[in-house]
Image (tube, rainbow, N blue to C red):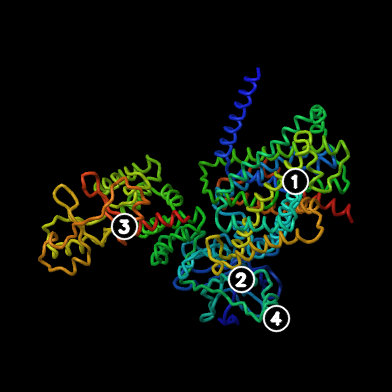
């Protein structure tokens, strides 16, 4: 009896490793982008959604997922057809003035995201008892080292494997035995009230899931990979898979936080509070499990985000780029990159900055910036001369426009309600 | 006609400038300018106006412009519809095809983005003389030129200079110019192949293959040797088998073999099938060898002779064959069975009497490696002896190929990342 149990466990472990291996082989730009998407801001926003509103907003994941798939597919298609990055295309179609202001906007938004990654690192390491004055400078240095020394590609898979951590939310979600009928009902009976905290939450949810910087990053990765139009269907599959994975993870984080934190009336003030959601699975070790996930997610995103931001700024403004260049050859490139990292890390070191609100509100800003990026994308992808035979169909246009308009309306409603 | 022109203009001075009727009525804004393709500096022959009413586009030929300063006014009464514009072959739209695009600066040998354009007044006509790729140009476009100037001067006493590239050194990559690229690619061929390779690597996929298509076979082959394998492969897949085989024939055999090994087997076979029999045979032999062994590094484009050949005859053959050789530092001396007997360096040849046979000056004590020797071993030998080339033999001491210094550098630079 015991023997067969052991065998089945070892069998399932082996098959799990096989799954992980298969996943790593298949992981293309879409899946990688999606996993980076569940960064510090993402985990925080999903946790807050569950802890503050229970399952009330969980239905929003369905429309967000559809929008994410459509928007990322548009990015990938543009990358494959034009062979150019999103910021290049915006510069070439709309001219220097618009591109310049857009780039400033992206810089500020992404600065917020970089700060949130370091906030995640600080919060995670504080659970391990490491002071942020040690963890943040060390983290900044590690990120800088990984990128400048060009070892990112070899570390990427390690980060990706560490994302297996998200499974703990799925396991917890099963352990807590939620009332699945009730969960299902929440999906088919969407509820929405216009109070500011709920509007902010939804904008944050959209902003963290469909972050503007991801679209630039995804398109750049597709271009760099040199995917051809004949191979495009694999890239599309990769993107759909990635988007579904993000949402499965998001669903379980919200569910677990709703079932544990919301039911017991715990408000998330610090990362330790958010970690309590994993207690049914990991007991007293829940904080470590959570902290490990948060640190991994933060470092993963922090290695990608500042660099991709620097690339798009320098390419858009026509500055020399490339980590293989010397400082004197590409001073602006290194300048912008260092500014992002050191400012991002520096702000976290300011005494008593609240980490959870930083991570949360950077995602809300993402959500507010999204419609602008989306409108540029829509204008580009419907340009017949640029996209040749690959412009958007009516359904795609409709969904993307609805997303942009809804986000603008939500932002306006929120601003009006606050004032 | 005197248009009241200033000495020079930037395109940003014109973009969105208002255009007036002779009566003083405002009619629209400048959207674009049309220039004549012509060497060395294209002349502006008209402007494209977007009217206020329903944003229609109109073409206004230069002759119809009454004055530029102080306000741009046209003479005559009706504007011509934009649609029946002149042919794309002789003219181009400045903003659509040049502004904000990537271009190749063939003087500095790099890919840059155009921020603004610089026109010069020559005999009351404007000619496009420079492209501006500097930060100042960008600030001018955004409308912050004066502000940035003030700030920089006040803070750092620093004057932001214009970064201008002469139109002579500009190779366009976009629009209808791509179709004409083969005509204008003469600007690219004087570049060093390694620079050209860097430029091609910097470009986006579409521009990359367009430029590559336009190069003549020899330039393409030289550049291809310097391009990273991943892009090499992508480029070879976009061209016809005939062109591919012509290019491969021009490449050094060791580089060509590496390239073919990266392609799919069918594609490589197609290309080999189109090639000259003899060269294809050589490449097939090289292709058999494992990567990362001496066999994978060697080339077959070397010179071998029998021992009784005189120095005089050797020099003559060297001279005749040098354009096709990868290895010209040594002549390898073989007997009838192709067994390696000795080696003669080019220095020995020039120092020797012209009627002496090679057997008299050859160095018999030879260092050579086997076909399956590991490449790291090869690198060590090069470092130890300071060779410029190293022969590769099979188990019967028959010469199979020669490894050049260049291939060793490739191995080393690959190891260093």
Residue B357 appears in which quarter of the rendering?
bottom left
Residue A365 appears in which quarter of the rendering?
bottom right
Which type of secondary structure does the marked residue at label 4 adopt?
A: helix
Q: Do labels 1 and 2 share a chain?
A: no
Q: Work out whether B326 lies above or below B39.
A: above
Q: How crowded is mark 4: few (under 14 residues within 10 Å), some or many (20 or more)?
A: few
Foreground disc of the pair 1, 3: 3
Residue B255 x/y as whole percent = 35, 53
- Of the image marks 4 and 3, the number of the one nearer the N terminus: 4
Q: Which residue is drawn at 86% across and 36% down?
A: A263
* Residue wearing tag 4: B154
Residue A376 x/y as whole percent = 67, 54
* Residue wearing tag 2: B135
Foreground disc of the pair 2, 3: 3
Q: Are marks 1 and 3 on the same chain?
A: no
Q: Is residue A366 visible?
A: no
Which type of secondary structure does the marked residue at label 2 adopt?
A: helix
Q: Residues within 10 Å of mark 3 (few under 14, many from 20)?
A: many
Residue extending furthest top?
A1
Distance from Cα at disc 1 to Cα at disc 2:
36 Å
Q: Which of A321 and B60 is in front in this view?
A: A321
Q: Residues within 10 Å of mark 2 (few under 14, many from 20)?
A: some
Q: Given the image, what chain letter belongs to the residue carrying mark 2?
A: B
Q: Work out whether B187 lies above or below B339.
A: below
Q: Residue A206: which disc?
A: 1
């Amino acid at each position: 009896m015991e023997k067969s149990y052991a065998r089945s466990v070892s069998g399932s472990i082996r098959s799990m490793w096989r799954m992980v291996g298969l996943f790593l082989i298949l992981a293309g730009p879409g899946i990688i982008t999606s996993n980076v998407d569940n960064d510090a801001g993402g985990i925080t926003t999903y946790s807050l959604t569950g802890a503050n509103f229970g399952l009330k907003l969980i239905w929003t994941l369905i429309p967000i997922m559809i929008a994410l798939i459509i928007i990322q597919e548009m990015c990938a298609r543009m990358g494959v057809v034009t062979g150019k990055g999103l910021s290049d295309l915006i510069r070439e179609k709309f001219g220097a003035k618009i591109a310049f202001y857009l780039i400033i906007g992206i810089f500020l938004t992404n600065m917020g995201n970089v700060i949130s990654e370091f906030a995640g690192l600080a919060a995670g390491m504080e659970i391990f008892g490491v002071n942020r004055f040690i963890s943040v400078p060390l983290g900044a240095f590690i990120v800088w080292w990984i990128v400048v020394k060009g070892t990112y590609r070899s570390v990427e898979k390690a980060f990706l494997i560490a994302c297996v951590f998200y499974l703990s939310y799925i396991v917890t979600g099963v352990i807590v035995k939620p009332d699945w009928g009730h969960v299902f009902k929440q999906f088919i009976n969407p509820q929405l009230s216009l109070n500011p905290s709920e509007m902010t939450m939804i904008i944050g949810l959209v902003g963290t899931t469909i972050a503007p910087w991801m679209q630039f990053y995804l398109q750049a990765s597709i271009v760099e990979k040199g995917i051809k139009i004949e191979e495009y269907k694999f890239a599309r599959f990769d993107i759909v898979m990635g988007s579904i994975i993000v949402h499965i993870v998001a669903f379980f984080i919200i569910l677990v936080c709703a079932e544990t934190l919301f039911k017991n009336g715990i408000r998330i003030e610090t990362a330790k509070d958010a970690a309590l959601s994993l207690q049914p699975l990991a007991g007293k070790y829940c904080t470590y499990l959570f902290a490990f996930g948060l640190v991994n997610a933060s470092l993963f995103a922090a290695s990608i985000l500042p660099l991709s931001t620097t690339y798009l700024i320098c390419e858009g403004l026509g500055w020399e780029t490339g980590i293989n260049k010397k400082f004197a050859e590409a001073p602006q490139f290194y300048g912008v990159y260092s500014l992002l990292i050191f400012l991002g890390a520096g702000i976290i070191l300011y005494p008593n900055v609240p980490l959870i609100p930083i991570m949360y509100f950077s995602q809300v800003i993402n959500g507010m910036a999204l419609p602008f990026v989306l409108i540029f994308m829509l204008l580009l992808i419907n340009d017949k001369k640029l996209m040749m035979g690959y412009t958007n169909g009516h359904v795609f246009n409709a969904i993307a426009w609805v997303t942009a308009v809804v986000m603008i309306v939500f932002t306006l409603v929120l601003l009006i309600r606050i004032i | 006609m005197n248009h009241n022109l200033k000495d020079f203009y930037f395109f940003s001075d014109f973009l969105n400038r208002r255009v007036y009727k002779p009566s003083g009525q405002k009619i629209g804004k400048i959207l674009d300018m049309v220039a004549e393709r012509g060497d060395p500096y294209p002349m502006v022959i008209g402007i494209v106006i977007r009217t206020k009413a329903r944003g229609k586009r109109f073409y206004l030929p230069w002759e119809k412009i009454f004055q530029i300063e102080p306000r741009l006014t046209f003479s005559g009464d009706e504007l011509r519809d934009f649609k029946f514009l002149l042919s794309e072959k002789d003219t181009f739209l400045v903003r659509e095809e040049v502004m904000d695009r990537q271009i190749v600066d063939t003087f500095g040998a790099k890919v840059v983005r155009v921020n603004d354009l610089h026109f010069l007044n020559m005999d009351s006509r404007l000619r496009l003389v420079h492209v501006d790729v500097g930060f100042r140009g960008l600030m001018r476009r955004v409308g912050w030129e004066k502000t940035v100037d003030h700030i920089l001067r006040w803070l750092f006493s620093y004057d932001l200079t214009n970064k201008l590239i002469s139109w002579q050194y500009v190779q366009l990559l976009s629009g209808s110019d791509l179709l004409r690229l083969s005509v204008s690619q003469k600007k690219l061929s004087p570049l060093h192949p390694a620079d050209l390779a860097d430029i091609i690597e910097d470009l986006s996929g579409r521009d990359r293959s367009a430029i590559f298509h336009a190069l003549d076979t020899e330039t393409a082959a030289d550049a291809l040797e310097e391009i990273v394998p991943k892009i090499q492969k992508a480029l070879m897949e976009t061209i016809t088998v005939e062109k591919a085989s012509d290019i491969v024939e021009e490449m050094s055999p060791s580089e060509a073999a590496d390239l073919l090994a990266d392609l799919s087997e069918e594609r490589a076979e197609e290309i080999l099938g189109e090639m000259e029999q003899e060269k294809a045979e050589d490449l097939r032999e090289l292709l058999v060898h494992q990567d990362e062994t001496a066999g994978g590094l060697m080339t077959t484009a070397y010179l071998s002779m029998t021992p009784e050949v005189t120095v005089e005859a050797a020099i003559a053959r060297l001279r005749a064959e040098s354009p096709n050789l990868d290895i010209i530092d040594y002549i390898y001396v073989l007997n009838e069975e192709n067994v390696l007997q000795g080696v003669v360096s080019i220095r020995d040849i020039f120092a020797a009497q012209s009627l002496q046979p090679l057997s008299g000056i050859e160095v018999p004590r030879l260092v050579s490696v086997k076909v399956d020797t590991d490449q790291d071993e090869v690198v060590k030998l090069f470092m130890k002896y300071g060779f410029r080339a190293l022969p590769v033999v099979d188990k019967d001491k028959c010469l199979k190929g020669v490894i050049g210094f260049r291939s060793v550098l490739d191995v080393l630079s690959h190891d260093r990342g």
